[in-house]
Amino acid sequence: MGWLDGRKNPRYLLLFLFTVALSSLTPAAGAAPAPDYDNIVYTSPNGVDITLDIYLPPATLGDGPFPGLVVVHGGAFRQGSKEKWAADADRASASGFVTYAIDYRLTCDPANPPTGVDPSLCGYGATAPVSDVQAAIQWVRANASTYRTDGANVGVLGGSAGGNIAGMAGMSGNVGEDKADVVASWSGEVKLPLRPLAPEIRYIGCKLSSCPSKWDLASPHFFVDPSDAPIYLANSTDEIIPLQEATDFRDLCAAAGIPVELRILEGTRHERAYKNDVWAETMSFLHRHLDS
């Protein structure tokens, strides 16, 4: 039986059994980090429960309270889930945020939902996801003390479609209530009429030529005023989101006196494909505008 024969090599057998037991307790490579609290209902529009996961900062950073950060996944408005951002939510919590990864309503077909999507979250359009993020911000503020969060300082981070929704959360709503205190948007669609393609048409519910005002109402670009949240933007030069959206929006925010930064990356990378290049400055921008 060779080295597994415990009668001949008891020490090796014990080592083998210990190794097997240890491996069963070790997360698989690439497994998403587990949240500290999961599947907490934060809003129930028309009886549909929508949930979030919470990632707390490590004990080495103290007891808090810490600024809150709502993270909003992308997915062309029709797919994705809070689990998609689990690793990034956990990473942000290590930077000193209480991070809230949220699900929200999507445009998918309830009869044929994308993999990993609750069908009850399908069948919606503009601007249901914005209402959901605003509800999440309100929920975070209302429950701040329970989760070691500074309810007066709540930001939002999103990418792609999530960047659009995050931008809307910083450009609309009521300050100190459902409006974000700071926003970071990676490859966010801020001016939807510049990209009137199938995902956007499905989200708005009509073509640009037939209902231009509805497209404007789902675009952060058309909500800018001096009371809006500071915003960090990132966009690649040749990616699927036109760089013009980001540069026009930066200029508009700057003209309104809103603190704004735009990081332009060369190439075609979209959203989280470049996250490691912008992570440190994103966290720095968020902390600069959230830390009391």
Image (tube, rainbow, N blue to C red):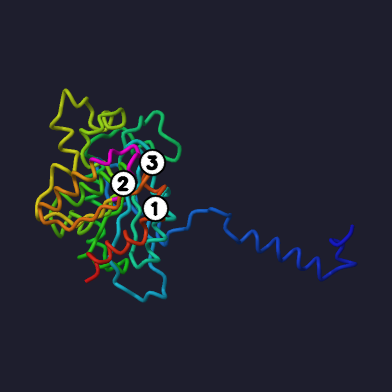
Q: CA distance from mark 3 to mark 2?
A: 9 Å
Q: Position of residue 280 (x, y in %)?
A: 36, 62
Find numbered disc 1 in the image and state the secondary structure of the residue it sits on.
Answer: helix
Asked whether disc 3 touches disc 2, contact meaning CB atoms under 8 Å apart, the reply is no
The residue carrying mark 3 is 268
User: Residue drawn at (89%, 59%), measured in percent from left and top?
Assistant: 2
Query: x and y percent of residue 233 in the render?
Result: 27, 51
Quadrant of residue 121 in the image? top left
Asked if residue 256 lies left or right of residue 62, the reply is left
Q: Name the side, left or right, on which 91 lies relative to 180.
A: right
At horizontal 57% and vertical 58% (from top left) the residue drawn is: 27
Residue in the foreground of this view, choosing between 59 and 245: 245
Q: Which residue is mark 2?
A: 235
The region drawn magenta spans 234-244
Q: Secondary structure at mark 2?
A: strand
Of all residues, the one furthest to the front in this rendering is 266
* Nearer the observer, 9 or 161: 161
Q: Residue type at mark 2?
A: Asn
Query: Is disc 3 surrounded by few (<14), some (14 to 19) or many (20+) residues within 10 Å?
Result: some
Three-letter code for the amino acid on which mark 1 is drawn: Lys
Earlier sequence position, callout 3 versus callout 1: 3
Separation of marks 2 and 1 at Cα, in angstroms? 11 Å
Q: Indicate yes or no whether the magenta region holds residue 195.
A: no
Mark 3 vs mark 1: in front: 3
The residue under label 1 is 275
| Picture coordinates of residue 279, whole percent (x, y) | 37, 58
CA gap between label 3 and label 1 equals 13 Å
